[in-house]
Image: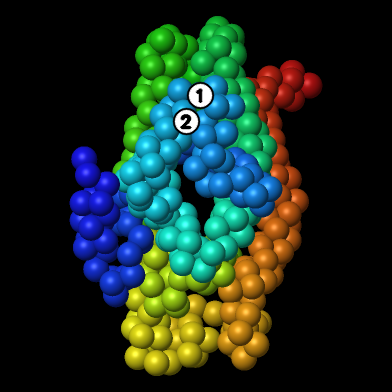
């Protein structure tokens, strides 16, 4: 496929960019994650800072690489450069390896002659994304393990332990407390069909996972989370941090404000995208970015003042990144607080569930002992 023709089609598809080339559609942005973009940006920036020409720098990266998939991407870049294309054009022809955000940054940096700086900034942006993902995964690991282990204990008690108690109480012939009777009846039913019980649990988990992955369900769940008083505000801050960091990256690379806003819209959630679209229209009409973001609810009292300072000093890009860092720090404190609160609450709930099952199993024994006394 002709890379130049592909470039024209991608640019035409991105009509929202007001003619600025290089901002590919969202499906290109979501291309494969196998290519090590962060490492590529870091190493290429180091080689360019050392004075090595771009073609030789890419050739050097290709020669030291062991992954066949990465070698193919780097070889395609070298081939495109040898045919007279720019680095941005060569990257745009491989959306499976390079995001539209990186392509836009590289294209603007080539216009200004700050290619190495743009690569370093994008590497820092990817480092932030990886750190954010690691924090979210780390915060979820302990609750998931706790819930999983507790569920296995409850399943073991219900399927294997409770039926044996049910047989003992049935032989005794005494009247059982109604809650114990219900538990023992359920346990005995499951104990008589343990394989069906395990299959049912696995099927239930599979259905839950499938439903959770459905786009409509995820959208409904996200809408509900956004309506929650505390969680919704933090999710909004997370979206704003991503918006400000993306805008800061693009503006520092030399992308104009309006195309940068259009490109950032691809990374925004569906709930804030309409507000960003209206803010973009306001900026296109000549309004200041700080005023447009404030009017559309895409700022906080702190961030709007920081953006205004950036507009006055001509350091809008760096100031947007500082605003994003401010949000990052606030979210980190909130995540730490949630971990301190949620984990003990989960332990308490699971302890009550497991303890309740054990008490209900032994409650008839206590009742018999009282009758004997």
Kindly give the residue lying farthest to the right in the view shown: 373
In the rendered structure, the answer to whether residue 310 lies left or right of residue 207 reads: right
The residue to which callout 2 is attached is 70
In the rendered structure, the answer to whether residue 184 lies left or right of residue 369 reads: left
- Residue 249 rendering spot, x and y as whole percentages: 55, 65
In the rendered structure, the answer to whether residue 49 lies left or right of residue 276 reads: right
Nearest to the observer: residue 213 or residue 363: 213
Does residue 245 lie above or below 162 as drawn? Answer: below
Q: Is residue 221 visible?
A: no
Q: Is residue 278 visible?
A: yes
Nearest to the observer: residue 299 or residue 189: 299
Nearest to the observer: residue 100 or residue 30: 100
- Residue 205 rendering spot, x and y as whole percentages: 42, 29
> Residue at horizontal 63%, vertical 37%?
141
Quarter in which the N terminus is drawn: top left
Q: Residues within 10 Å of mark 1 (few under 14, many from 20)?
A: few
- Residue 268 rendering spot, x and y as whole percentages: 43, 63
Q: Are marks 2 and 1 in contact (CB under 8 Å)?
A: yes
- Residue 240 rendering spot, x and y as whole percentages: 53, 69
> Residue at horizontal 67%, vertical 66%?
325
Q: Quadrant of residue 372?
A: top right
Secondary element at image label 2 = helix
Secondary element at image label 1 = loop
In the rendered structure, the answer to whether residue 309 lies left or right of residue 211 reads: right
Disc assigned to residue 27: none
Does residue 274 lie above or below 155 as drawn? Answer: below
> Residue at horizontal 70%, vertical 39%?
347
Nearest to the observer: residue 268 or residue 155: 268
Quarter in which the C terminus is drawn: top right
The residue to which callout 1 is attached is 67
Gap in Å between the C-alphas at discs 2 and 1? 5 Å
Q: Residues within 10 Å of mark 2 (few under 14, many from 20)?
A: some
């Amino acid at each position: 496929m002709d890379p130049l023709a592909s470039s024209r089609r991608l640019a035409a598809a991105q009509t929202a960019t007001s003619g600025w080339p290089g901002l590919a559609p969202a499906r290109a942005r979501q291309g494969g994650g196998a290519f090590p973009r962060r490492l590529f940006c870091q190493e290429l920036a180091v080689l360019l800072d050392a004075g090595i020409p771009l073609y030789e720098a890419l050739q050097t990266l290709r020669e030291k690489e062991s992954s066949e998939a990465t070698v193919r991407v780097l070889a395609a870049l070298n081939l495109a450069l040898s045919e007279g294309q720019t680095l941005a054009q060569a990257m745009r022809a491989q959306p499976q390896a390079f995001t539209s955000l990186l392509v836009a940054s590289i294209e603007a940096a080539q216009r200004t002659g700050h290619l190495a700086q743009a690569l370093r900034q994008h590497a820092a942006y990817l480092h932030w994304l990886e750190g954010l993902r690691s924090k979210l995964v780390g915060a979820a690991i302990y609750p998931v393990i706790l819930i999983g282990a507790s569920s296995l204990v409850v399943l073991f008690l219900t399927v294997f332990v409770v039926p044996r108690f049910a047989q003992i109480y049935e032989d005794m012939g005494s009247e059982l407390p109604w809650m114990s009777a219900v538990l023992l009846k359920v346990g005995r039913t499951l104990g008589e069909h343990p394989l069906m019980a395990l299959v049912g649990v696995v099927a239930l988990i599979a259905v839950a996972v499938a439903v959770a992955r459905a786009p409509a369900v995820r959208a409904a769940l996200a809408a509900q989370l956004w309506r929650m008083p505390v969680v919704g505000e933090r999710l909004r801050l997370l979206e704003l941090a991503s918006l400000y960091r993306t805008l800061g990256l693009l503006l520092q690379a030399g992308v104009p404000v309006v195309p940068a806003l259009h490109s950032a819209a691809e990374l925004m959630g569906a709930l804030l995208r309409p507000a960003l679209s209206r803010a973009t229209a306001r900026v296109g009409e000549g309004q200041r970015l700080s005023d447009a973001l404030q009017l559309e609810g895409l700022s906080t009292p702190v961030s709007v003042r920081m953006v205004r300072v950036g507009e006055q000093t001509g350091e809008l890009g760096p100031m947007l990144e500082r605003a994003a860092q401010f949000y990052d720090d606030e979210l980190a404190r909130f995540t730490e607080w949630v971990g301190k609160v949620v984990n003990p609450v989960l332990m308490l709930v699971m302890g009550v569930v497991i303890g309740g099952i054990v008490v209900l199993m032994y409650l008839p024994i206590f009742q018999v002992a009282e009758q004997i006394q």
